[in-house]
Amino acid sequence: MSELIQISALNQFLYCNRRAALIHVDGVFKHNEHTVAGELLHKQVDLPGYEHRAGWKLLRALPVFSQNLGLSGKADIVEVLYENKKIIATRPVEYKKGKVSKWMNDRVQLCAQALCLEEMFGIEVKEGMIFHAKSNKRTVVNFDAALRENTKNAVIQLHSLLESNQIPKAELKPQCEGCSLHEICLPEISSKAEKKMLNDLYKV
């Protein structure tokens, strides 16, 4: 893979491939209440550093990358557990403002961080956590074979999309409602226009 892409772009891609292309190909972005709230939440963990808690060493804003997958990014928190000065467990923790996502994007983003950590440090990362600020609870994510395969496939598809420099057509989806690019993308208009064109084309 020619160049490293941001792990955050993987999240955008799985949420909506058109959104990912608008942001990372056309450079279009617009904030809404959801993106602003997310940025404010991440300010808590965006300052690099570390602390110790319940026997774990917590590394904040740790840069991660994978040459094999062509990925780079930053893990909100990486928790490391030592025994006799040897690492015996590592898990990434991703901060999200809302509740558990209906889609796979958050889990795949976290798994991508784990794959980066495994390549960087030569260790197995079995699980991670997603901290949901709305409920103040953590969700455990097991990095099983299926999730790893889904993550690698998504990475390949994202690379292909960005290298094509093409913007997928608009398609009205349930996740459009909370998307900050809704007014730019206009999926309702695009969907209606396409339907009208097809009706006119096949009108008897």
Image (tube, helix red, strand yellow):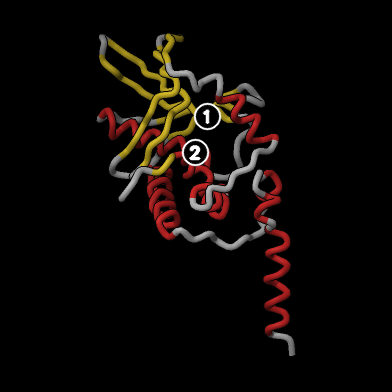
Residue 47, above or below 1: above
Label 2 amino acid?
Arg
Say which residue appears at 54% left-offset and 61% top-offset: 168
Say which residue appears at 44% left-offset and 34% top-offset: 142
Q: Are marks 2 and 1 in contact (CB under 8 Å)?
A: yes
Q: Secondary structure at mark 2?
A: helix
Q: Position of residue 130 (x, y in %)?
A: 52, 29
Which disc is residue 107 wearing? 2
Which disc is residue 164 wearing? none
Q: Position of residue 44 (x, y in %)?
A: 55, 19
Residue 200, above or below 150: below
Instruction: Report crowding for label 2: few under 14, some 14 to 19, many 20 or more residues within 10 A (C-alpha).
Output: many
Say which of 65 and 107 sits in front. Answer: 65
Question: Most extreme residue toward the front, as rendered?
Answer: 27
Q: Position of residue 184 (x, y in %)?
A: 67, 52
Q: Position of residue 140 (x, y in %)?
A: 50, 29
Residue 161, above or below 77: below
Which disc is residue 130 wearing? 1
Residue 166, above or below 182: below
Q: Quadrant of residue 133?
A: top right
